[in-house]
Image: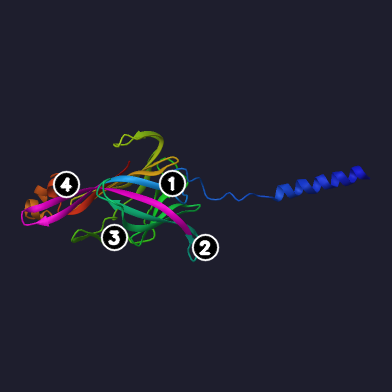
């Protein structure tokens, strides 16, 4: 009788084990780890195109930026966000000054970032080579963005795609990472618009390099509206408005 009772208990235990399914949670965020206190410091080169009577000027600035995850909060849908602060300074001899706040979260679909009232899908799961996605589902890609004294639809035509995964890479700052992920975000080059953007992430670190090059022309300054003459000119010559931002981890 005692043996029968033990067998019955083992049977119940086995059945209860089979019914327990652990929560899988979100996919791995190895390429964008989130934790309160995490901080990244970057060298930023910013070029803004400024119209002038003599042609288009390239106004260049170099600065340092530091992004830190300060705490967490939940939105109305109960989603957990990490709230971050971006600070900037001219160089290491200066004090940090607040520049903007941002928020980052992850779920089963990917990694999201909010900044300047825009929400981006930075990474889409699963992280597979050649995976494509729309990173701007939360806003109209033709939404104008203030660039200096001009407005430009910076995000028009962007098409996110993973072009490298788990590849070693050395930044211009000299930092070497054994496993990195490269996302091509934009590759547009037509008569009036140029958009080139990419973001590189390092496993266990997060974003280590970002480039946005968004420029526009009406071929007026270079060619008095002659699009035939304008077509084959380099964008450094024919651009009339836009900006170029390069951000590299120190």
Instruction: Say what secondary structure mark 1 lies in.
Output: loop
Q: Nearer the viewer, residue 172 or 98?
A: 98
Q: Give the distance between the C-alpha atoms of the residues marked 4 and 2, in whole angstroms.
A: 46 Å
Question: Does the segment drawn in magenta span residue 52?
Answer: yes
| Residue identifier under label 1 | 32
Please name which of the two marks, 4 or 2, marks the residue nearer to the observer: 2
Task: Tell whether label 3 touches label 4 (CB within 8 Å).
Answer: no
Residue at position x 31%, y 34% in the image = 174
Please name which of the two marks, 3 or 2, marks the residue nearer to the observer: 2
Question: Does the segment drawn in magenta span residue 235?
Answer: no
Q: Give the distance between the C-alpha atoms of the residues marked 4 and 1, in whole angstroms.
A: 33 Å
Left or right relative to 63: residue 131: right
| Residue identifier under label 2 | 78
How many neighbours does mark 3 have within 10 angstroms: few (below 14), some (14-19), or many (20 or more)?
A: few
Task: Tell whether label 1 touches label 4 (CB within 8 Å).
Answer: no
- Where's residue 91, x and y in %? 25, 46
Tell me the magenta residue range: 45-72
């Amino acid at each position: 009788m005692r043996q029968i009772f033990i067998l019955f208990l083992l049977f119940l235990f086995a059945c209860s084990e089979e019914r327990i399914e652990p929560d899988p949670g979100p996919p791995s965020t190895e390429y964008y780890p989130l934790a309160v206190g995490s901080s990244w410091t970057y060298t930023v080169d910013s070029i803004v195109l400024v119209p002038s009577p003599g042609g288009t000027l390239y106004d260049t600035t170099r600065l340092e930026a530091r992004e830190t995850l300060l705490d967490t909060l939940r939105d109305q849908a109960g989603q957990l966000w990490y709230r971050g602060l971006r600070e900037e300074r001219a160089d290491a001899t200066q004090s940090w000054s607040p520049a903007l706040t941002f928020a980052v979260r992850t779920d089963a679909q990917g990694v999201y970032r909010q900044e300047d009232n825009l929400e981006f899908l930075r990474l889409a799961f699963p992280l597979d080579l050649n995976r494509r996605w729309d990173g701007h589902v939360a806003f109209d890609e033709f939404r104008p963005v203030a660039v200096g004294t001009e407005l430009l639809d910076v995000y028009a035509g962007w098409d996110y795609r993973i072009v490298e995964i788990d590849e070693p890479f050395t930044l211009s700052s000299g930092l070497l990472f054994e496993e990195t992920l490269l996302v091509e975000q934009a590759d547009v080059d037509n008569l009036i618009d140029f958009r080139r953007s990419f973001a590189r992430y390092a496993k266990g670190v997060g974003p280590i390099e970002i480039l946005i090059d968004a420029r526009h022309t009406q071929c007026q300054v270079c060619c008095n509206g002659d699009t035939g003459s304008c077509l084959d000119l380099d964008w450094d010559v024919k651009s009339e408005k836009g900006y170029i931002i390069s951000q590299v981890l120190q």
